[in-house]
Image (spheres, helix red, strand yellow):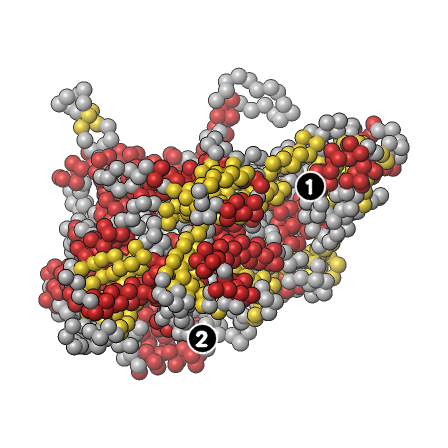
Amino acid sequence: MTTAPRPTTAAPRQSLRTEILEARPVNLDGFVEEWPEKGLVAMESEFDPAPSVRVEGGQIVELDGRSRDDFDFMDTFIANHAIDVESAERCTAMPSAQIARMLIDPGVSRDEVLAVSRGLTPAKVLDVVKLMNVVEIMQGMQKMRARRTPANQGHSTSARDNPIQVAADAAEGALRGFAELETTLGVLRYAPMVAIALQVGAQVGRGGVLTQCALEEATELELGMRGITAYAETISIYGTESVFIDGDDTPWSKSFLAAAYASRGIKMRFTSGTGSEVQMGNAEGKSMLYLEIRCILMAKGAGVQGLQNGSISCIGVPGAVPGGLRAVAAENLVASMVDLECASGNDQSFSHSAMRRTARAMPQMLPGTDFVCSGYSSVPNADNMFAGSNFDTEDFDDWNTIQRDFQVDGGLRHVREDEILAARNKAARALQAVFAHLELPPITEDEIEAATYANSSNDYPLRDVLADLKGAQSVMDRGITGLDLVKGLESAGFHDVAENLLTVLRQRVSGDLLQTSAVLTGDFTPLSAINDPNDYAGPGTGYRLQGERWEQLKKLRHVTSSTNPETEVG
Amino acid sequence: MGAREGGPLGERLVVGVDIGNSTTEACLAVVAPDGSITYLGTDLTRTTGVKGTPDNTEGALKAIRGTLTRAGRSAGEVGTVLLNEATPVISGLAMETITETIITESTMIGHNPTTPGGEGLGVGTTRSIAELGERQPGEPVVCVVPHGWDFDDVAATLNAAVAAGVDVVAAILAGDDAVLVTNRLTRPIPVVDEVSAVEKVPLGMLAAVEVAPPGRTIRTLSNSYGLATVFGLDPAQTRQVSPVARALTGNRSAVVVRTPTGDVTDRRIPVGELVLHGAGKTLRVDVDAGAEAIMEVVGRAQPLDDARGEPGTHVGGMLAQVRDTMADVMDIAGQPDVPVSEIAIRDVLAVDTFVPAEVRGGLAGEVALENAVALAAMVRTSRSRMQLVADLVSEGLGTAAEIGGVEGEMAVGGALTTPGVDRPVAVLDLGGGSTDAALLTREGECTAVHVAGAGELVTKLIDSELALGDRDVAEGVKWFPLGKVESFFHLRHEDGTVEFVDQPLPPHVFARVVVLTADGPAPVPTRHGLDHVRRVRREAKRRVFVVNALRALRQVAPGGNLRALEFVVLLGGSALDFEIPDMIADALAPYGIVCGTGNVLGTEGPRNAVASGLVRAHTARLAEEARCPTG
Amino acid sequence: MSASPPPELTTADYPLSINRPELLHTPSGKPITALTMDAVVSGELSAEDLRIAPETLQLQAQLADASNRPQLAANFRRAAEMTAIPDDEVLAMYNALRPRASTAAQLAELAARLEGTYGAPVCAALVREAAEVYARRDLLARPVADSDQ
Amino acid sequence: MTTPTATAPDRTVSLREVGPARRGTRPDEVVIALSPAFAGHFSKTIVDVPHAEVLRQLLAGIEEQGVTARLVRVIDTADLAAISHTAARLSGSGISVGVLSRGTTMIHQKDLPRLSNLELFPQSPLLDAPVFRMIGSNAAQYAKGEHPQPVPTRNDQMARPRWQAKAALLHLKEFDCIEAGRDPVEVEAVFSRGTTG
């Protein structure tokens, strides 16, 4: 930056400090004024309805100021399926301040809060969280998170849809701690091969990591049915009837889809987030958070075990209005306080400012959520086919350091270079074996060498895309399933990987992963809100980062040894 | 024909395996004691590794197991596995441009903007639009407009100048604005646009700008005497500028600037001499003499022992490159490398082609079609490693495996199982790298030859002549018929017929020339029309397969006389092509030859000839031994 | 909402794959313990064996009820009914439920098919409820396909 | 992050209504459909390219190809697909270009489903004058039954944090200018030099 005075131009003179501030990345972000009439407002809008509920003959006949015959389909669905009719009138009549206090009071257990929240209307829920500042919201999240143990989810994609890269990065991601890995495509026809790569790579890195491939419903479901992927997440829902219809769905079609996934033993969660409705110009004059609460209750009513929210792909909208990130933190809390698994966003490029990017994640990272990011880009953002995440591979060491600084478990850990190289190499070889077994276009030794040491898709030899696409098509045509992957791995001598994948596949027969917030631990124990319920009851209780896990998180790339300060540990 | 359960004693189960360049085929059969053969089935898989190397084992085993499972037999029952002796011909390709067009001192702008403006011829002195105001009336001016000028401003400036009496007769624009500007002019003039390097146009020089009406081509600047007239040239100068005229032929618009020493040369690049050893002679031919000359000399050097290129020349490099790759292919771990000297080039096919190349010194990215020669070279090696493959197969399967015979001969045997075929029969195996011919005489003698050039070369020619720069697209153009998507609901096939569809076609093929692949139309990224693409495709096939068919058959035909042949059966991957068989049949018709695509075993089409031939040969040998037992 | 029978299973039985494997079997009747690598290699297992059985979904529904998640339980019960429906028909049914994709009659037909052919009353109820709401909110199929909103 | 600037910022445009939009008969025309607030409530795109320049370049691209253009304003919707498809069905060639006030642009064809398109340029912050020229040129070439190379589309991951909210705001304003039930009208572009409005 220059300190010399600039040549005077026609423009009025500017202070040197202003010039420096003007040049700060945060000023590349966009900010707008609120416009409540149109719903361009985070969570404080006089146009949101006042809470009200009336029950007649075991049916809700009035909801937030609307009587049943004026219900749009969101009202109807929420009234019929989401709200507990028996307790509705009593709970909604409780003072909002009392419910808000229950949320942060260590003396009130999670179950006691759920007993109240299941009877609340959308407007009532909004009325409650509006009373809470961001620290209180974090306090509430700490208690209401469904699973006791927090976790994290990663994105593993490739700008060239290169399956070898996806496999290697999935292996590294799994090794670094992601409990779930998600991929998607630039060229959709590549999906089967990349999904296979993700599954194989993940099981190399850490047995039991769950994978998914975000696609249009039909293909996503088919890959899941075949056991090539293990769960699904990109089933979008919206807070107004008109936008829901624009998305060519209704609460009933989505509920049917939810059951379809469960009927194939596949874990699934919906996706929603503040800002999507106003982004599409049909917010019907309601605040972003009110509409998101309707989404959350709709998901609850559909009987899905969880929800991905936290604005997600619309983060630029709440990010630009006053109090926007408070609303985003609140929507995560609401998902948790109605007992849904919450994969809490932090998954889209959000700001030019590193400081803002970090701050944005604190309300999820510090209290901990079921998945702090949904997900964290475990590839360089240039390779991120979800249009970039809030964090990527360059941030690994910063993330690990923040975990260590605050003694907070963000789901990741530092891993030594040699372990990472070994995993990446093995993943590429395992995939090479599977491709050979399935007669897919071969993977060369050069590609394996590249995969071992690569950072981005530019570091790999180019694939014969046409041949790959033919291969991908044949995977679908020949009805390849997860079982074929197991066979390929086993016959090529990758016994451990084959065993890992088979165990994951076996889980769909047991259905254990269908329960709320379920993940698979390293020893293949299903860990869900049932057998790992959040038992936070104040200081010293609930999940604490300690013992072996804490020892893991104390390790960084460079830590000076106290026994011999001339050396580094780890 | 189904699998016979059990069967009488002495029945033998044999598998013939043909390892080709791209596919490995297996044929399972039962040989009864009386020598009668019952075919139980066939299988086909991708060849693993380079033909003739141990890597082939995996593919071979896969194909064998394939047939066994289909026929419900087990490896244990197999008596013998028969492999083909792959005649170790491996082919390589190389292409060299032998001409290049160079423009010196920017005398010519010969590019063809899609939308020039105005019509007619304008001759005047080149002046920058910036200094138009200063021109004195009367002087004819060709206005040169640099980048960054808005079309409205250009038109206004020109109109003002004209109003002030400046005689603007033509304009040369940097941007794509010719029509926009002419539409706004008070006095119409010819305008050439999209001259990207407009700043290099020499100012203050006499220049001519010509634009033809839509659908026409220029008349004056593409005619040497037209140029002479415009610039007042004497015969010597006229001779000098004749390349300019030639370079501009066929354009709708052009600019020629008269500079003192400016010139367009069309020079031949010395590519070097091809040295051919054969028939006890050593013959030399300049590669830039073109394909015809080369092939004529190759013909005189038959049978070819080796071909080399003058070291240090392009052709030297071309052939050396081919040799080296062959050497690598034949290297065996743990064994001494194959000395490059052992690798003899036993046939060469030269094909004239052209490569669109950017003109050196051009001002608008002019492209000229440069002549080029493509060479397909075929290498024979003294090492075959099929025996090694046989050993590995036997090991992997736990049964005996042997070399059952040489490809060519086996192929004829298999071809004979085509209904309606009898000796003497010749087969043409249209492969990827080489075109093979074999003849089986009435007396049962068999001769086989291999000539360089086949499917791969066709693909390369299509790729370069259409400037696709994408082998896969070229492959598509080779394999599938063409069409033009005329609306979302109908497309016109290359034969002119129209096909209507009820589901709208995908947007990315709208209004495009497409290849009609199995999974729908795929766009061909080219500016050329359907007819041009079709012509290039058929020419490439003709220059390779028709030429090679005749070459190869002449080499096996008694006394090189094609009329002595009766049946010609086409085999191999390219025999499945939708037009090559017809092209070859047409070419052979005049010689009274029955030619068609084989139908091995009456069921397999042009496939599996070698594999089933192996079985026949094996059976014949058994019969021999039965008649005169050895020892 | 869903008045499910008093759960026989308690949350202590979760995860079934570890605590109650004896309750788990594949639709083809194999016990979950039969899903071994040897079985895969020997080719005894098909993809069918890696699907979830309706009985298992009923067990998970009991666990959901036992952990106070009635909506989740209801979802599992719909899923149990759906195990009988072939993959492509499941997708077809889903598409039929999209806005303005079906007429009232078509939805009634769908509900009937669910109940009749597949013995899926809970799913049928969901479709009938949708039909009623769609009619009220103008989301049934319209005669003219192409319309701008 | 690129923020293109207009090449001729001193030009302005106003649209004069000349009656209801009719279905064209000339096979050599492209219809340009403008959104409710284009060159009316708004005067420039999300990155300050003047609407005058957007229109000049689109028209220039079409004219350079020797094709004629007609302008219509769609008033009853701000949905780009709907605007473009409506125009495509009015176009004698069946080809249309739809433009939103913030710059988002689409080339459409009448036989395509409404939600499909020939070319879509969704990232309004990345569209500058030269791009609009190419879009006009391509539309005209489609109208002539030629097959132009699609206009290269750019992408920028950081467009979300910078532009998403402003885009939403502009979108809402555009929605405000919708007059339900009003049929598309034919308009005439009147360009004038002078300071940008």
Q: Is residue B236 left or right of residue B421?
A: right
Relative to D12, is B131 above or below?
A: above
Label 2 near label 1: C-beta < 8 Å?
no
Q: Chain of mark 2?
A: C
Q: Position of residue B361 (x, y in %)?
A: 64, 33
Q: Amino acid at mark 2?
A: Ser
Label 1 residue SS: helix
**From the viewer's perspective, is residue A31 above or below residue A472?**
above
Look at mark 1 in the image and give the residue it sits on. Answer: B247
- Local packing at callout 2 (Cα closer than 10 Å; few below 14, some 14-19, many 20+) is many
Where in the figure is residue A228, as x and y percent of width and height? 28, 58
Q: Which residue is mark 2?
A: C102
Q: Nearer the viewer, mark 1 or mark 2?
A: 1
**Mark 1 → mark 2, Cα distance in angstroms:** 65 Å
Q: Which residue corresponds to the image point at 68% horizontal and 38% vertical from the top-left?
A: B195
Depicted A500 relative to depicted A384: above or below: below
For the question of whether residue A118 can be seen, the reply is no
Q: Name the image quarter holding the C terminus of chain B.
A: bottom left
Q: Position of residue C19 (x, y in %)?
A: 10, 61
Three-letter amino acid code of the residue under disc 1: Ala
